[in-house]
Each structure stands twice: as C-alpha cells, then as structure tokens.
Image (spheres, grey):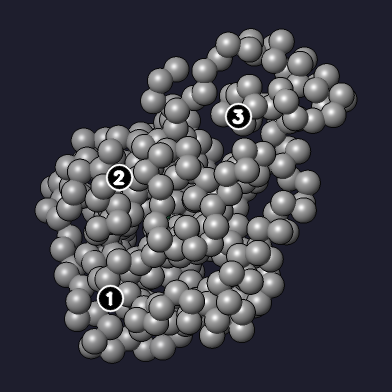
C-alpha cells in the first residue's frame, strides 16, 4: 500500500453533516463511526471490522487508503434519509459518497428482514470509497465498482449464481463490452449486470491473478482506454477475454439451475416450459403446482438510481424488496 500524498486527496471534499446532538463517535485510524447511544455495541463492532478491512482492501488494490472514512450509523430511517448529501431511495441498504469520504449505514433496528451482516455492507461501501479515491472524483466504471465491492465483501453468493443462471437460460448475458459502457436501466437487467460484474471480477482474479482487476482499475484511473487496460493486465484482447469468460459460464451447466430452483422461477416465467428434459419438467410441474402458474414476475429495483453514477453509490438490499406483491 502506497502512502497517500497531497494529490491523492486534493479532489476530495470531506463534509461530515451536522449530526444529532446525542450522537457519539468511535475514533479509529481508518474509520470514524458516528452513532446514536443505543447503537454503541454495533458501532464498536463496525469500527473493529473496518480497522482490518480498510488497510486490507487498500493493500489488495495497491492504492493509498487516504484519510479516515466517516461512517454514519443511522438510528432511524429519517436520519438515514436526511443526513446524506443526497436523498437515497427507501430501498437503499447502504450508501457511499467517495468524494466526501462518507458511508451511511442503517442500524440493525431499521433494516427490514435482511440476512446480510452489516459488516458485509460496510466492506462493500469501503471498496466504493477507496476506488472513488483511486479515480479522484472521476466516475468509476460501474462494473468495476460493483464487481470489486461484491467480491471483496464476499457477496458472491447463491443469489449471484441464481441471477447468472436466469440470464443464461434467457440467453440474456451481457458482453464484457456492454458491462463496460454502464448498467442498464431495466431493473432485472441491472440485477444481472451486478451479478455478471461480480462474476467477471472473480473470474479475472482466478484466471490471471489477484492484481489483475486492481491493475485494470489503476490503468483506467490513469486515463487508459478499456481495451488497453485489459490487454496490459491480461495480455489478451477484450474480445478474447469476453469469449473465454462467457464460454465458461455457458459450458458450466449453470443454465439448468433455474429449472430446478424456486428462487428465480417467477422471473423466467413461461419460457421454461419449452426447455428441458422430462425429469426436470416433472420437478418443475410439481413446483408450479405449489405456487400456481399465473403468478406474474416480481419486479425488483429500481437499482439504477440517477444519482448513483454521479456522486454516490446506492446499495440494493441483499434480498431485493419487491415493489409490488
Ligand atoms: Zn455498490
């Protein structure tokens, strides 16, 4: 990890909002966790966790960690909404504001039914701030931000493979070049883009070594083009990488997963009925009998908030809240 220098932080604008009078702070070298008195134990846990994560992630990215990151642990939804530089949508589970070095989390008392540990969300947001610092306020490509954040925060989970599987089945997988140009606005496609970003980062890391993606990030931050950055980190063209990455997914048999899984059943709808072997179809018919065939697809999102690319990163909940039941 390099030591930070003046130019590394010149673009940043630390701006801790005025916090409620009763808020306290756990001071650390890398993080300052601001919290309501009742959230003291959670704040201490987050501070201890972050004290390991910040230097670890900075080391893995080969970038300076920069100054301390302010983490605001909101005790109420009203605090979460009003203390931030911009109002988040009510589905956001956490936010990062790299330019201001700010992270907002919700205390466990106001997180609805999510199983994802708060330390995981914190790790994800720390990556956003550190990468934002690498790019010094310039927009960080979304696939890179969300891909690295999910992999470093260990969020490549069953839900990721379910989403990839549904994309495979629908022959909907995005190409690497598509991902590089931004995330789609359609919520289901955006969800696939999140999953594919995590998969791409994990695959590049496994195939070409742990510094491959950080090396692409540093090259892009220096102003290199996408193709040149990928070639200097891997020795391959974007097209060759894209073909190898997607061939491994399509050859994995993962596309069969939705046929036997309840998780994505409703998102793929009637298309499944024309695919698959007899045994698989029998299992699916039994599942449909349990759930009913007329259920409409459950809309998820919106994950692409208009402010997300501009100056902050908004996290969808680990288990996305449907807009309509
Ligand atoms: Zn994110």
Is 90 or 53 nearer to us in this picture?
90
Residue 136: image tag: 1
Crowding at dot 1, Cα within 10 Å, few <14 / some 14-19 / many 20+, comes out as some
Is 43 or 11 nearer to us in this picture?
11
Is 33 or 230 nearer to us in this picture?
230
Mark 3 or 2, nearer chain start:
3
Residue 305: image tag: 2
SS assignment at label 2: loop
Give the answer, above or below, for where 245 lies relative to 164.
below
Q: Quadrant of residue 131?
A: bottom left
SS assignment at label 3: helix
Question: Horizontal placement of 103 versus 194: left or right?
Answer: left
Image location of residue 219, percent across then percent down: 43, 82
Image location of residue 1, percent across then percent down: 45, 85
Query: Which residue is denoted by mark 3 in the rendering?
Result: 268
Image location of residue 238, percent across then percent down: 56, 72
């Amino acid at each position: 990890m390099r030591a930070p220098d003046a130019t590394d932080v010149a673009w940043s604008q630390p701006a801790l909002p005025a916090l409620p009078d009763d808020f306290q702070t756990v001071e650390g070298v890398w993080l300052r966790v601001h919290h309501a008195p009742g959230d003291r134990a959670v704040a201490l846990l987050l501070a201890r966790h972050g004290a390991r994560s910040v230097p670890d992630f900075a080391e893995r990215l080969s970038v300076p960690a920069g100054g301390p990151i302010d983490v605001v642990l909101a005790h109420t939804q009203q605090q979460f909404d009003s203390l931030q530089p911009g109002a988040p949508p009510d589905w956001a589970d956490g936010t990062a504001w790299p330019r201001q070095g700010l992270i907002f989390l919700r205390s466990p008392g106001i997180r609805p039914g999510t199983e994802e540990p708060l330390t995981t969300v914190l790790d994800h947001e720390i990556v956003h701030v550190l990468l934002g610092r690498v790019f010094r306020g310039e927009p960080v490509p979304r696939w890179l931000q969300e891909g690295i954040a999910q992999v470093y925060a260990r969020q490549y989970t069953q839900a990721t493979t379910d989403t990839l599987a549904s994309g495979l089945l629908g022959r909907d997988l995005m190409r690497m070049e598509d991902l590089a140009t931004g995330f789609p606005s359609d919520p289901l496609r955006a969800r696939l883009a999140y999953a594919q970003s995590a998969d791409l980062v994990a695959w590049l890391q496994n195939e070409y070594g742990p510094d491959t993606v950080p090396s692409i990030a540093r090259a892009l931050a220096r102003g290199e083009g996408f193709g040149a950055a990928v070639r200097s980190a891997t020795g391959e063209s974007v097209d060759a990488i894209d073909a190898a990455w997607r061939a491994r997914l399509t050859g994995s048999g993962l596309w069969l997963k939705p046929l036997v899984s309840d998780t994505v059943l409703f998102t793929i709808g009637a298309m499944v009925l024309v695919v698959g072997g007899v045994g698989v179809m029998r299992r699916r018919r039994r599942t449909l009998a349990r759930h009913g065939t007329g259920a409409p697809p459950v809309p998820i999102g919106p994950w692409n908030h208009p402010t997300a690319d501009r100056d902050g990163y908004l996290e969808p909940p680990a288990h996305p809240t449907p807009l309509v039941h």
